[in-house]
Image (tube, rainbow, N blue to C red):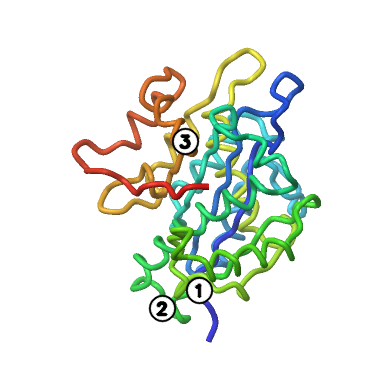
């Protein structure tokens, strides 16, 4: 039996730590989750956006290459759709031991762990909505030339074997290591939506060359953010490491998080595992 859900995964920002030489302050990883029987709707959504903004039917939509008004329209169409997303945001300067994550894809792998924990919770919570499949999710990663995907598969197996000692909170009844594929954005329309979601949050976090951020996209996506009992922060939108909490509480540029993603009196959110 096939999976009930598809999770399209893409990122924004980079994994570098040379902040004075152009490395981004933030690295963002997003998963767009959709019921398998509704996957055709992702293609229709992308086609609708391409027609509206005058792009070629065969040209993939890359969010960073679009004009602002086109980006707003694209995000608006996503926000009206039936997808859900999970997004993990890493503020790299806040990492206490950045040297641990300098090794090839180490930061990406660790972010995938956080992402898949929340993807598994989202699919588990919405399993009753799926009309077909066995309740599991197929992971569809955007192809990154620098990522060793065989190593990523091995890493998932490692996390599963040591879930207890490492406090890994992935629901392995939902996430199966063999349900894993890698495609380019032209092959799977859902990856173009995942690119837009990741890039939209990145725009709300990473200052541009003039020192400004653009939070509008992130604010618009609140309705499609996975939430548990009304709480999105810590679930559908996760900030890491823990030291980032102070930024979320106080930084003017992150006011959109406090205004749109916090829920008053919701109680404590999930605790972070230790790297």
Crowding around mark 1 (Cα neighbors within 10 Å: few <14, some 14 to 19, many 20+) is some
| Residue that lies at the very extreme toward the right in this rendered image | 145
Residue at (45% x, 46% y) in the render? 79
Name the mark on residue 218.
3
| Residue 92 vertical placement versus 228 (above, below) | above
Q: Which residue is mark 1?
A: 37
Residue nearest the viewer, comparing 217 with 202: 202
Mark 3 vs mark 1, CA separation in Å: 27 Å
Where does the image place residue 49, in percent across and percent down from the top left? 61, 47
Q: Quadrant of residue 209?
A: top right
Residue nearest the viewer, comparing 77 with 207: 207
Residue nearest the viewer, comparing 21 with 41: 21
- Relative to 219, 21 lies left or right: right
Where does the image place residue 197, in percent across and percent down from the top left? 55, 44
Q: Quadrant of residue 102?
A: top right
Q: Quadrant of residue 107?
A: top right
Q: Does the CB distance between marks 3 and 2 fall below 8 Å?
A: no
- Relative to 186, 205 lies left or right: left
Q: Secondary structure at mark 2?
A: loop
Q: Earlier in the sequence, mark 1 or mark 2?
A: 1
Name the mark on residue 131.
2
Q: Secondary structure at mark 1?
A: helix
Residue at (18% x, 38% y) in the render? 265
Q: Secondary structure at mark 3?
A: helix
Crowding around mark 2 (Cα neighbors within 10 Å: few <14, some 14 to 19, many 20+) is few
| Residue 18 vertical placement versus 124 (above, below) | above
């Amino acid at each position: 039996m096939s999976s009930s859900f598809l999770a399209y995964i893409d990122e924004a920002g980079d994994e570098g730590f040379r902040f004075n030489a152009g490395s981004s302050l933030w690295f963002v990883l997003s998963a767009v989750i959709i019921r398998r029987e509704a996957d055709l709707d992702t293609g229709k959504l992308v086609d609708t956006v391409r027609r509206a903004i005058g792009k070629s039917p065969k040209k993939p939509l890359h969010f960073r290459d679009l004009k602002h008004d086109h980006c707003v329209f694209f995000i608006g169409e996503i926000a009206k759709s039936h997808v859900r997303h999970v997004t993990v945001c890493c503020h790299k300067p806040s990492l206490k031991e950045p040297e641990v994550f300098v090794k090839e894809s180490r930061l990406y792998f660790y972010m995938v762990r956080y992402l898949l924990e929340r993807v598994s919770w989202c699919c588990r919570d919405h399993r009753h909505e799926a009309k077909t499949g066995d309740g599991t999710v197929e992971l569809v990663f955007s192809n990154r030339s620098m990522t060793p995907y065989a190593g990523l598969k091995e890493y998932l197996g490692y996390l599963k074997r040591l879930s207890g000692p490492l406090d890994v909170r992935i629901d392995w009844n939902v996430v199966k290591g063999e349900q894993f594929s890698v495609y380019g954005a032209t092959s799977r329309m859902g990856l173009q939506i995942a690119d837009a979601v990741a890039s939209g949050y990145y725009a709300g976090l990473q200052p541009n060359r003039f020192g400004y951020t653009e939070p509008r996209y992130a604010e618009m996506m609140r309705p499609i953010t996975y939430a548990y009992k009304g709480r999105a922060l810590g679930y559908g939108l996760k900030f890491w490491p823990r030291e980032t909490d102070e930024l979320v509480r106080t930084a003017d540029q992150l006011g959109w998080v406090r205004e749109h993603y916090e829920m008053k009196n919701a109680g404590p959110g999930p605790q972070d595992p230790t790297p």
